[in-house]
Image (cartoon, coloured by chain):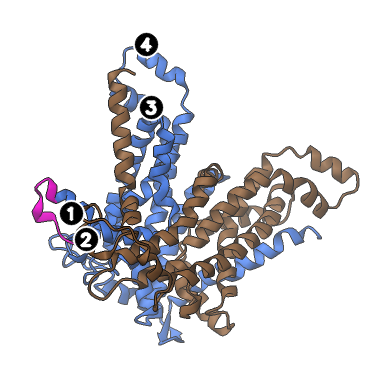
Chain colours: A brown, B blue
Amino acid sequence: MKRPRIILYVIAWLIGIIWVLPFFGVFVTSVRPFGEVVDGWWQLEEFTLTLDAFRQAWNHPDAPVGPALLNSLSIAIPATILTIILASLAAYAFARFEFRLKGPLFSLLIIIMAMPGQSIIIPLFAHMITLGLIDTRLGLILIHTAWGIPWAVLFLRNFFLSVPIDLEESARVDGASDLTVFRRIVLPIALPAIVSIAVLQFVWVWNDFLFALIVILSPDKKVVTQTIPLLRGRFDIPWSVLSAASVLGMIIPLLVFVFLQRYYIKGVMAGAIKG
Amino acid sequence: MRRLIFILPALILVALIVIFPAAETIRWSFWGWDRLEMTEFVGFDNYERLFGSRSFINMARFPTQNPPWGALIHNIVWVIVFIPLTALLGLFLAVLLREVKGGSIIKSMIFIGMVVPLVVGGMIIRFVFDGRAGIVNAALRTVGLDDLARTWTAFPDTALLSLILGSVWIWTGFAMIIYSAGLELISKDLYESASVDGASPWRTFRRITIPMVKPATLIVVVMNLIYVLRIFDIVYVATRGGPGGASSVLAFQGYLFAFQQREWGMASAVFTFLTLAAAIISVVLVRRVK
């Protein structure tokens, strides 16, 4: 290596380390008692390794994070599966069929993708009360599904357009129906794209705070993102417990990202407006 | 007709849960509300009250005094600081990390902010800027800037700034990967002929890199504008819009109007503004995707 290369190398790693330092700090804080980290997690005169903060966060009287993790899963998994089913069907229609209003409908999907959740929360709140869907998992699952569909349709439609149509046509000549062609030929080919959607939609639903805040009101139904703001103490902020809750809340999205990074980035690159 | 089966379920769900409520938000912003009951059509009354509300816009304090300047101004300040910073940092990191061994690992590290829940991001912002336990303040003390070392999120003059800087930390990963992809598309020949002509690295950067990543810049700017309109979680967790509204933004202020003050007319007006802003921005996206 030439000298300028080494300097670049050092600078790059320094930036990377500084960038993740806050996350590192949260991990360190979560396994140390509050008294040791109140003047900074990097103070090492005393160093006690303990899972106390995790235990406290898990069973917290106001915002138990353990049950909340299960609640998050019970929302995110169905909302992901439903989105995939509905969006892949619709995306196939957008890619292969001609129908009236196709162009305008497609533009509408993109405009919807750009909207913030705030555009819909007031009427949603009102109607969910009327329909008895407030404070139900079903209500939140339906919102996330509808909210995820536009982006998933766009992504899958572009994928379908890039696949040669020959195979589908020869199957049709053999007498296969649209649904059979879709199930037997299109879906298997689309598997990588569907994994991208599953990964992003799951993480997005898991990370959501706004919709959960509006819909889920009972303490025992709250999802993990709702518990974290509730853990702030009245005077002192209990950094260890808060950090432990944060670690629990981010570990699943992090693992998904680490192991399925290729699919994740592909989804983001394809114009994901989700965030 | 049987082909309708493909599109109808998705369309009905999106119409009922997204399109219809979004239209209602706009309609409701023109109606009077008594608690949660619609009363009568009031024209632009809610908008007039909004512009008269200091939590929405406070020109008396802007820019000579410290925030609160009102949520609208805070959002505008956010755009002005956040967009150039994330774009420049993102491009810088994309260029740097392309050159460096192990660059893709560093990219993943920087991208983590985009992957974890924003409430965790907000908690971390509060944490790093804490007067006692925060690492930013420890760094400031180390370099002798003791005057600046305090809980940034708790003071009107620094609360908004700390949130904006935190958001740059969270979102720069997005600009970085978009620029990284943009750089891949630039042909190596261009750089080779530039170096044959003896162009300096800076000149090459300005004359080749920047013009060639223009499409990426467009995506970064458009998407980041959309992100700024949505800023909510980190404000909710780190400052609750405080102190005294000094770090409130539109998405958060509308939430307060709707769910704490039960002012559904004004809240709908704020959210209508956000919806229209997003619709205008999305025109760029519609053109690009089609």
Q: Earlier in the sequence, mark 2 or mark 1?
A: 2
Labels 1 and 3 within one chain: yes
Segment tinted magenta in the rendering: B141-151
Q: Amino acid at mark 2?
A: Asp
Labelled pair 2, 1 in contact (Cβ < 8 Å): yes
Q: Amino acid at mark 1?
A: Asn
- What residue lies at 22% left-to-right and 74% top-to-bottom? A235
Residue position for label 4:
B196
Residue position for label 1:
B137
Element under disc 2: loop
Closer to the eye: label 1 or 4: 1
Residue position for label 2:
B130
Query: Residue A198: x and y, percent?
Result: 60, 54
Q: Quadrant of residue B270?
A: bottom left
The CA span between labels 2 and 1 is 7 Å
Q: Amino acid at mark 3?
A: Glu
Q: Quadrant of residue B161?
A: bottom left
Query: Residue B67: x and y, percent?
Result: 19, 64
- What residue lies at 64% left-to-right and 50% top-to-bottom? A194
Total residue callouts: 4
Q: Is residue A47 depicted above or below A173 in this figure?
A: below
Closer to the eye: label 4 or 2: 2
